[in-house]
Image (cartoon, helix red, strand yellow):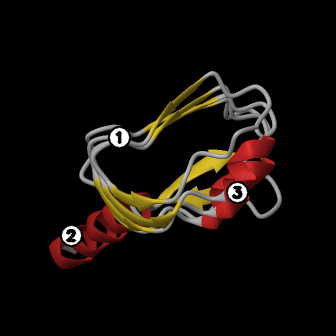
Amino acid sequence: MLLLNRLLILSIVSFSFCRDCIVGVEVELWKECYNITSTTKLNISGSGLKGEIPSEISYLSNLYSIDLSNNQLSGEIPSELGKLNKLAFLYLQDNQLSGEIPFELGSLTNLTRLFLSSNQLSGEIPPE
């Protein structure tokens, strides 16, 4: 009986860390689920994030602020960020991002703050 109780507790603890996102309602980014329509701010600054910025971030169509600064993100900035037409603030500084600054960022007409410093980016910020 004691072994059964321990197994039950272990399965409950394991399940709480393995939540699947609801398809069509949520998107998974860095092992967390975010609601596609109600997520307006994404602030994961200084959280030790590693790897690339997932292109699925563009599914969060109502984002007006993204702060992924002070992490260890690498790779290129996904061009899909250019689809986030409500985006006003984009903070990607102090990471390990590389490659060209995507031309698609020029379509972000509501963008008022763009921080890209302390990365290994090349190219120019689109004039738009």
Q: Tell me the CA gap for discs 2 and 1.
A: 40 Å
Dot 3 lies on which element? helix
Q: Amino acid at mark 3?
A: Phe
Quadrant including the C terminus: top right
Towards the viewer: 16 or 100: 100
Q: Earlier in the sequence, mark 3 or mark 1?
A: 1
Q: Residues within 10 Å of mark 3 (few under 14, many from 20)?
A: some
**Residue furthest toward the top?**
112
Seen in the image, is 78 located left or right of residue 98? right
**For the residues carrying marks 3 and 1, which lies nearer the camera in this image?**
3
Look at mark 2 in the image and give the residue it sits on: 6
Seen in the image, is 109 located left or right of residue 48? right
**Residue furthest toward the left?**
2
Dot 1 lies on which element? loop
Q: Tell me the CA gap for discs 3 and 1.
A: 21 Å
Q: Which mark is residue 69?
A: 1
In which quadrant of the rendered view does residue 37 lie? top right
Look at mark 3 in the image and give the residue it sits on: 103
Q: Amino acid at mark 1?
A: Ser
Q: Residue at x 27, y 75 (%)?
A: 7
